[in-house]
Image (tube, rainbow, N blue to C red):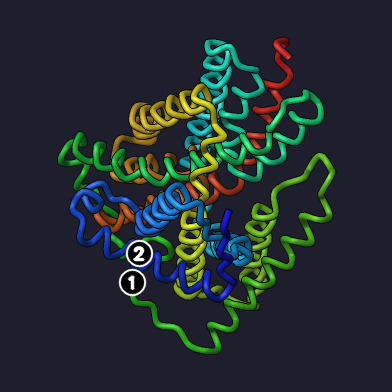
């Protein structure tokens, strides 16, 4: 097989072009705009499909350098942490608890569907869990960790490859269904509920195209804070690795961001410049998603046998139904609930960056939702990993094992 390797600089250029291409597609293709598909998802998925076509027809593979992908993702989570002041978190506290309850319900449902479908199709039940909350709500990182356990302790062959393929499938679907779900919910809302828009102007991650005045000195300060989050999060992750408190690095980075912002403000040493941090966060988010999607090796989804694809298809439909029938209704059946449902689709099948991209696409079209941009990042990036680990262990402890 012929492989063409694109270096780091070339991959960064390609990711930038993918974003511009995605913007053009969403602007010019009515159906993409109507379904509020995020620009990075539109551009990245089209490029991934083109790479699949080239690979299938000629055997020629283009391999991008993804070394910047992890730092960009961590920088994005750092900006989420730095944007989380205690007053905002307190204001959204009760709503956050309610949304966490909704998320817990989805985790349970995903594992029950996975186990039920695996039993129905005559598959190893570990495969059912692998196609459940482990890879869908958990993503690639959780999938890699648990697939190693399944492989070493239960002899499940090809567990890692299957986990990565399941997580990739979820990442794509998570970015695709959020917009259509939001559009459907908006069409079903009562006129007075749809009209209830926040009075204040959008800020932070809500409106990535808004103009924000910044200076060189403040930009350097914000960049330094992000770097501190990355360094501190990396050290914290290494310190708790192998313990009962082990968490993914991005969760540690987010935690350090929250700590930095509130300690510095509490001591009167520094006030985080939210508008500037949001610029850096939105740039990191857009480039990360573009790189992640344009680098998808879709032909590797062939590793998923038809029964596994069937389980994942059912999971995607169940996610959409859950967002419509549960997330939207429990969270208030209003404009905020629509944005929360779109975000839930993003991290319920894919990852928190996908959730933010979904919500940005929805709020750009239907109006801002401050509440959603407080609740989703904290639940989707922090609490869900802890909750998912506990629920996975609960299912592993069932007598069927």
Q: Is residue 357 visible?
A: no
Q: Nearer the viewer, residue 52 or 22?
A: 52
Instruction: Look at the image and tell me whether residue 65 can be seen.
Output: yes
Residue 144 placement (x, y as % from top left): 68, 41
Q: Would residue 265 be found to the left or right of residue 22 on screen?
A: right
Q: From the image, which quarter does the C terminus lie in?
A: top right
Does residue 37 appear left or right of residue 158 in this picture? left
Please state which of residues 382 and 154 is positioned toward the viewer in this rendering: 154
Instruction: Name the residue located 52 percent from the left edge and 56 percent from the top edge.
Output: 61
Binning the other alpha carbons within 10 Å of mark 1 as few (below 14), some (14 to 19) or many (20 upward) gives: few
Q: Nearer the viewer, residue 161 or 175?
A: 161
Pointer 2: what residue? 207
- The one of 22 and 185 positioned closer to us in this rendering: 22
Residue linked to disc 1: 210
- Say which quarter of the image contains residue 268: bottom right
Alpha carbon separation for disc pair 1 and 2: 6 Å
Q: Which mark is residue 277?
A: none
Which residue is at a point 26% across and 37% down the rendered structure image? 185
Q: Are marks 1 and 2 in contact (CB under 8 Å)?
A: yes
Q: Position of residue 389 (x, y in %)?
A: 68, 34
Q: Which residue does the image show at 21% across and 55% down from the upper left? A: 29
Circle 1 — which element?
loop
Residue at 31%, 38% (x, y): give it: 181
- The 10 Å Cα crowd at callout 2, few under 14, some 14 to 19, many 20 or more, is many
User: Does 271 appear above or below 118?
Assistant: below
């Amino acid at each position: 097989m012929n492989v063409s390797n694109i270096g780091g600089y070339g991959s960064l250029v390609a990711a930038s072009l993918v974003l511009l291409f995605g913007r053009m597609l969403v602007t010019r293709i009515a159906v993409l705009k109507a379904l509020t598909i995020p620009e990075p998802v539109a551009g990245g998925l089209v490029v991934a499909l083109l790479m699949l076509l080239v690979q299938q027809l000629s055997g020629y593979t283009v391999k991008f350098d993804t070394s910047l992908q992890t730092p960009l993702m961590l920088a994005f989570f750092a900006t989420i942490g730095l944007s989380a002041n205690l007053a905002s978190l307190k204001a959204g506290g009760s709503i956050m608890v309610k949304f966490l309850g909704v998320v817990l319900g989805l985790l349970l449902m995903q594992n029950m569907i996975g186990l039920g479908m695996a039993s129905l199709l005559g598959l190893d039940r570990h495969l059912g869990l692998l196609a459940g909350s482990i890879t869908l709500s958990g993503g690639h990182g959780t999938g890699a960790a648990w697939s190693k356990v399944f492989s070493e302790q239960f002899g499940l062959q090809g567990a890692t490859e299957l986990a990565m393929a399941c997580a990739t499938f979820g990442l794509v679907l998570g970015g695709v269904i959020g917009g259509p779900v939001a559009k459907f919910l908006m069409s079903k809302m009562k006129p007075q509920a749809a009209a209830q828009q926040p009075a204040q102007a959008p800020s932070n991650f809500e409106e990535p195209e808004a103009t924000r005045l910044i200076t060189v000195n403040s930009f350097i300060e914000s960049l330094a804070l992000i770097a501190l989050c990355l360094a501190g999060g990396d050290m914290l992750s290494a310190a708790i690795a192998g313990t009962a408190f082990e968490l993914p690095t991005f969760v540690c980075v987010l935690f350090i961001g929250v700590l930095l912002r509130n300690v510095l403000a509490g001591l009167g040493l520094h006030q985080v410049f939210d508008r500037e941090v949001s610029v850096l966060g939105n740039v990191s988010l857009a480039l990360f998603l573009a790189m992640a999607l344009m680098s998808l090796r879709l032909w590797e989804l062939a590793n998923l046998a038809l029964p596994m694809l069937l389980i994942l298809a059912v999971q995607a439909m169940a996610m959409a139904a859950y967002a419509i029938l549960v997330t939207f209704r429990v969270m208030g059946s209003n404009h905020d609930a629509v944005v929360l449902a779109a975000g839930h689709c993003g991290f319920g099948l894919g990852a928190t960056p996908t959730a933010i991209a979904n919500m940005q696409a929805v709020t750009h079209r239907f109006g801002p939702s401050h509440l959603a941009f407080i609740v989703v990042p904290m639940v989707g990036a922090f609490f869900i990993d802890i909750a998912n680990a506990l629920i996975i262990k609960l299912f592993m402890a069932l007598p069927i094992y």
